[in-house]
Amino acid sequence: MRKKKSARPPVIGVDFDGTLCQIFKSNVPYIPKSVIRGKPNKNVVEACRRYRRSGCRIVVYTSRWWGDYHWLKQWLDKYDVPYDDIVPGKFKADAFIDDTTVNPSLDRDWEDRLCTILGKDLPRGKCPEGQKS
């Protein structure tokens, strides 16, 4: 008798700049991209934690120069962001969380949309009054 193949976990791609890490605004005309000064987007970090606990794979992707890998890893570890991999550019995933697609900063229903894309109900966070989820 053949063993039934288990379904692979959903893969969620999470953009770094502007999604996981807030854009750092400064009066300094040029700050090297390798210096990551932005704070974490707490709603996205919490969502990543919930999704990972529910069995999803979290893959952080970026358009940054691949020489910044060390800085990205250091920032993710500093803020205890769960991830399974870091990749340059877009890749094949079941869903993406990105400030130019499913935008957690502008879209109140972004988690509902993500569940629709994946066809799976995922645990959702509670949104404090007056704050976007």
Image: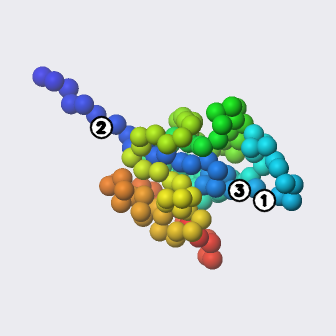
Q: Amino acid at mark 2?
A: Ala
Residue where numbered disc 1 is placed = 25
Q: Is residue 88 above or below residue 132?
A: above
- Whether the residues at callouts 3 and 1 have beta carbons within 8 Å, the answer is yes
76 or 87, nearer to the observer: 87
**Residue 41: horizontal and vertical position, in percent?**
65, 57
* Residue with the most extreme front position: 29
- For numbered disc 1, what is the local secondary structure? loop
Q: Which of marks 1 and 2 precedes in the sequence?
A: 2
Quadrant of the frame with the C terminus: bottom right
**10 Å crowding of disc 2: few (<14), some (14-19), many (20+):** few
93 or 11, nearer to the observer: 93
Query: Which residue: 63% across, 77% down?
Result: 130
Q: How is the image coloured?
A: rainbow
Q: Amino acid at mark 1?
A: Lys
**10 Å crowding of disc 3: few (<14), some (14-19), many (20+):** some
Residue 113 falls in which quadrant of the image? bottom left
Q: CA distance from mark 2 to mark 1?
A: 43 Å
128 or 87, nearer to the observer: 87
Query: Which residue: 55% across, 62% down?
Result: 104
- Whether the residues at callouts 2 and 1 have beta carbons within 8 Å, the answer is no
Quadrant of the frame with the N terminus: top left
Residue where numbered disc 3 is placed = 23
